[in-house]
Each structure stands twice: as structure tokens, then as C-alpha cells.
Amino acid sequence: MFYTGTRNSNIKVTSAEAIVKGLSDEGGLFVPENLPKLTESDMKHLCKMSYAERAHLVLKKFLTDFTDSELKSAVESAYNDNFSVEGITELSQLYPDCYILELFHGPTCAFKDMALQLLPHLMTISASKSEAVKGRHIAVLTATSGDTGKAALEGFRDIENTSVTVFFPEDGVSLMQKRQMTTQEGANIRVCAVKGNFDDCQTGVKEIFSDSDLKAQLAEKDMVFSSANSINWGRLVPQIVYYISAYASLLAAGEIEQGEKVNICVPTGNFGNILAAYYSREMGLPVNKLICASNSNNVLTDCINTGVYDKNRELVLTASPSMDILVSSNFERLLYHLSGNNESVIKALFADLKEEGRYRLSSVIHEKLKALFYGGWCDEGQTGQTIRDVFTEYGYLLDTHTAVAYKIYTDYRKNSGDSTKTIITATASPYKFCAAVKGALTGEAPEADEFITARKLEELTNTKMPEPLARTQSLPVRFADSVEISEMKRAVSGIISSL
Ligand SMILES: *Cc1c(COP(=O)(O)O)cnc(C)c1O
């Protein structure tokens, strides 16, 4: 199985090459040339398997240049007792027809762990297969709006011949997220705050990747840059796994019948998570509607509804910061597939985005998009109201991101009358965003100390702060640096010298 580029279909690389490189040379993203299928017998087997075995079965279809034993060792290293629940993910039924797929039981309490516990293993195996990278140190650089950074640090910590540097927006992450990153353990990791927003961090990192001075400095030290951001193919495949796994679990538990369709609803930022749901559908998983939920940064809602993607607007800082994004990078992959794998269409659209900050989909692509996806958004007041309502009614505590998804799911149900059973992905523990969650329940302002807020939330809801968050309270802050946007490059140069 080979991978090609969304902006150049002459590209043909193996999965290992796609994972090591992250971004394809012409600026496009790697996509599979064709999608493997799930068979009925796969589904039968999946029902009886552990999560790691399910991951193995799915990965094998995509990473055909990996050996069986490489895949086995990767999934076993990724999915074990580093997750706090035996099934790795957990399905909670809120009421008949509505299931919450909890993806936040990993070491950093956000769904990013599902991919980032596996990616370092995929990346080191991929590197060993690539003549250009073999034996060289992989310096992972990542910009984060909070959750990716922590999950990348935890995933790559002390993995041989790799290092990870994370840039986060100083005022754009929750106190708990900041605490998690600045206390990170491990010898091969660095964390740096940036005086700017997430887009500034992301742009800074992109410039660093193509900077010729830094490239020369790297080459001298026999190192290569790589990225752990969600454009990396190695992050998408592990995400396909949990949709297939959730379906198998529902089937095994007799909650659904073989072949019964389900809706999937996802709180969306960079479009990685919901794209994985789309891929699972294309593989043959019985999925009806994909429900794309946004916060006030509702670029995707508008695009699904009008066919115009327009990022010419102010980025709004919300209580669901991992969705505060105006350019959802993985949307390019979806458009590529919807255009019938047509690179010219993608090149034209993204040239428009670069020049005018917007593009208009052809009516054919827009119709396909609307047939597959429902898009909706809600504001801060509605998010808080949803957290309050769901806790009062069902005793279930949602985080701010999952609350957005739940709200849009109820809107969709009301507007469409569709009562197909629905899986809503829960992407973070409410304790990662305890100030906003407690505020939603009580109307009180947060305490200056996030641990006091968290303890109050525990008392209020009779729930428990996950252990990985609780333990950061006693860890020393290792990284207190904060740099101007213009200083990011110099910071990276210093880090390379120190490695
Ligand atoms: C990253 C993240 C999202 C958005 O996921 P995408 O794959 O970027 O669309 C939503 N919720 C949480 C908690 C996240 O960390």
C-alpha cells in the first residue's frame, strides 16, 4: 500500500516514509492511494479482541511495509497499563441511543494519547526503514494549543534517539495544561511558552522547519526535524482504530446489530479526529452521519453549510481551547478524497486560501460534504449550560470540548429527526479544564490555584481528579521560559546545540 500527496499525485511513498516526513515536499499532506476494507470476518474477530489486538488488525491494513512483529511490539508498548482503564477506551451510555466514547484515560487525560502513545514507536520503526533517516536523531518540534504538546512529551519521553520540543501560547492554555507541560519529566524533552497565540506558535514552527540555517545546524549534528502534529499520517491511523473498536464493543455487548448504522459526533479543531471517523466509514464501518461540532471558531460549520471556507475573522479564545483553530489542516485530506483524489482541485483551493484567506468549493464537492457531514457550533454560554444540564440530568460530567459536541448532537437530532444511535467522542477529562467546568456548574470565578478548583469540583460532583493530573501538584516546574514569537528560531538553535 502506498501514499501520495494531496497536491502532487506523482508522489508515491511507503507508510514509513510518510510517517518520518510528516508533510510532503510540495506542502500537501500524505494520503493513502486507496483505502483498505473491513470484512465481515474482521468484525467477528474484532469483537473478541483486546484493544491492542484491534489496533494491530487495523494498522496492518495501512502500514503494509511494517512486519507483524514490529506492529505487535508497537501496539503492546502503546496500549497497556499506561491507560487507567483495562479496555483503553470506555463507552458510557448516557441514555438509549446516546453513547459517550471516553478517549481520555491515557497518561495526559486527553484523546491525543490514543495516537501519541503509539506514534513514537511507529516513528522509530519507520526511521529504521528509511535510508535518509536511519541512525539519525529525530528532533520533534510541535506547536500546541495544550493537549498535543503534553501528549507528545509523554509519548516521546526517554525514547531513544529522539527529542521533543513543544511551544505553547503563554495565555492560550488552561492552568492545568500549563502545569502538565512545565513539570514534564524526561531527559530528551524541552518546553517553551510563546508570547503569542496558537496560530503564532504554529506559524513559527512551520518557518523553523524550512529555515536553511537551522537545517544546516541539524545536518551537522546528524539530526532531522519531524512533527508530532495531527497532519502526520502516524497520528491518523491510530485514531481510526478507536471508532472501529467502539463499534465492535457495541456489537459484542448486543447494543447494536451487525451492520446497524451509527452516527459519530466529534468536537473538532484541526479535523484529525473526525477525519479518522470518515476513514473508518470509507473502510466499510456502518456509519450514517458524521456530526462536526465547533465552538465560536465556526469556520467549518460555515463551510459545511455554505460551501465557503473563510478564515478572515478574529480567532476567539474559548473555554474549549483545543478547538480554537481557524485553519483545520486535515480538512485538506477530506477535500482531496471528495474531489475524487484530484490534486488540481486542491492546489487551486489552497492557493485561494493563501492569497485571499478563503475558498469556495465546487457545488459537486459541497453536495458530497453536506451529504456526509452535519456541521454546527455553539457559544460559551451554551457550552456552560450544556455542562450544567447534562450533569443535573444524567450525573455525567462533560469537559468543555465534549460539551460542545453534545450540544451540537442534540441540535442535529432536533433539526433532522434522526434518532440513529450516536457515538459522541469525549476528548478530555473535565479536570483538565476544571476552572471552566466548575464555573459552569456554580457560576463562581476560578481560584488562582487550579488544584483548589479541582478539589472543589471533586466535592461538588463526587468525581475524582485523575491521578496523572493530581500528581503534577507535587512536581517541580522545570520549564519556566517564555519567548517572543521572533525568538522561537533562536530558542530552537540553542536546543539543538544542547542535545
Ligand atoms: C485536539 C483536541 C480536539 C480537536 O481534535 P482535532 O483532531 O484537532 O479536530 C478536541 N478536544 C480536545 C480535548 C482536544 O485535545
Image: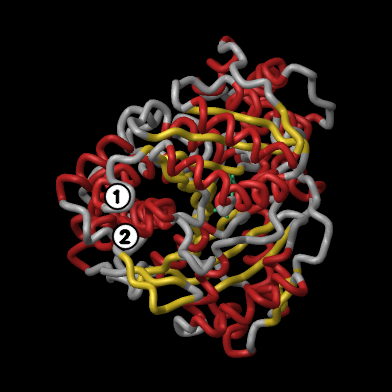
Query: Around disc 1, counting alpha carbons within 10 Å, would you say few (fewer than 14), some (14 to 19), or many (20 or more)?
Result: many
Query: Around disc 2, counting alpha carbons within 10 Å, would you say few (fewer than 14), some (14 to 19), or many (20 or more)?
Result: many
Q: Answer with the quarter of the image where residue 455 lies.
A: top right
Residue indicated by mark 1 = 126
Badge 2 element: helix
Q: Is residue 158 above or below residue 138?
A: above
Q: Answer with the quarter of the image where residue 19 lies.
A: bottom left
Q: Of 405 and 499, which appears nearest the observer?
A: 499
Give residue 138's position: percent from left, percent from top. 40, 40
- The earlier-in-sequence mark between 1 and 2 is 2
Q: Is residue 368 above or below residue 139?
A: below
Residue placed at 48% from the left, 37% from the top? 152
The quadrant the N terminus occupies is: bottom left
Colour basis: secondary structure
Badge 1 element: helix
Q: Is residue 455 left or right of residue 311?
A: left
> Do labels 1 and 2 touch, CB within 8 Å?
yes
Visible in this render: residue 430? yes
